[in-house]
Image (tube, rainbow, N blue to C red):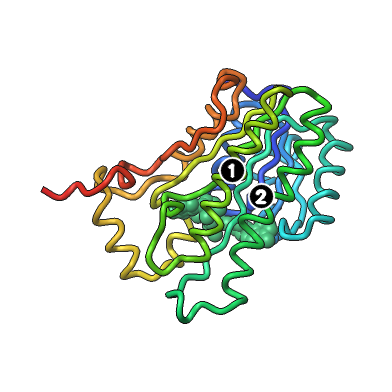
Amino acid sequence: MQRYVGRVVMVSGAGQGLGRAMALRFAEEGAQLALCDLNSVAVKETEQACGPERALSSTVDVSDGAEVDQWLYQTVANFGRVDVLVNNAGVIRDSRLETMSDNDWDTVLDVSLRGSFHCSRSAFRQMKAQEYGRILSMSSMCWRGNFGQANYVAAKAGIVGMARTIALEGARHGITSNVIAPGLIDTPMLASMDADAREKLASRIPAQQVGDPADIAEAAAFLCSEAARYVTGVVLDVDGGISIGSSLR
Ligand SMILES: NC(=O)c1ccc[n+]([C@@H]2O[C@H](COP(=O)([O-])OP(=O)(O)OC[C@H]3O[C@@H](n4cnc5c(N)ncnc54)[C@H](O)[C@@H]3O)[C@@H](O)[C@H]2O)c1
């Protein structure tokens, strides 16, 4: 399918993992891409993989509002518009509540929640002027609560609330706002998790396998398409069934 010909897609945290997989998928479907990451080398590699003629990579820290505004400005200067924003950048700093440092709390909230706020605010202004837009934010199956992740859960639950509010404010302007809540997906972030916790969680997946980044890219490609114009404020679980509940028998 070529659903994104003539569309401009911004992806944060596009240097690896889900961000890179989504960028490649949008590129395959004809999009022009504005990609950002804190890691300049990695995001340049994604730019090359997408095709440098259709992608522009930038080094941006999404927790910095001025850097994000500049990224949006550059994107519009280069491509003329912004049709899709994917709020993907995120980090983990896991520990139990009683040992969690202020820095662990702030870092996770600053990148995931504040970063999504900065990018959404910038893109929303442009999308409102165009009377068209798709904002997609990466939450997590963990937004409902997860042992040892008070900071991450707070950020990912915050993203759900923010995205649903953006859906209300955007609906009259042709802007949708949706959320994907991935389960365990095979990326560098998953590999960096405590191995014991990862194995325990993986053993509870009803589909009996961790997900592939392409599974998330598939859902993103639908939610950000023109065909999804009447889908807004939704949290789509893409998780092999793990959020349904116990599958023990
Ligand atoms: N992989 C999973 O199992 C999983 C599950 C649920 C949710 N998620 C969410 O999906 C998103 C992508 O996850 P992933 O597994 O690909 O992670 P990842 O760690 O593999 O990639 C994240 C990317 O974000 C970039 N980044 C970090 N801080 C940044 C900042 N301040 N500004 C710009 N870029 C920054 C990193 O450099 C990296 O390239 C995250 O929001 C994550 O919380 C992932």
Residue drawn at the location 26% of the way across and 43% of the way down: 207
- The residue to which callout 1 is attached is 137
Helix, strand or loop at label 1? It is strand
- Nearer-the-camera pick, 102 or 88: 102
Q: Is residue 163 left or right of residue 215?
A: right
Decide: marks 1, 2 in contact (CB < 8 A)? yes
Helix, strand or loop at label 2? It is helix
- The residue to which callout 2 is attached is 116
Q: Is residue 6 left or right of residue 86?
A: right
**Percent x, y for residue 111?**
65, 60
**Percent x, y for residue 45?**
66, 52
Q: Can residue 17 be seen in this view?
A: no
Amino acid under disc 2: Ser
**Percent x, y for residue 22?**
57, 40
Q: In this view, does 121 lie above or below 130?
A: below
Q: Is residue 241 above or below residue 149?
A: above
Residue drawn at the location 65% of the way across and 24% of the way down: 4
- Nearer-the-camera pick, 61 or 174: 174
Q: Is residue 21 left or right of residue 127?
A: left
Choose the circle earlier in sequence order: 1 or 2.
2
Single out the residue that lies furthest toward the left. 249
Quadrant containing ligand 1 = bottom right
Q: Residues within 10 Å of mark 2 (few under 14, many from 20)?
A: many
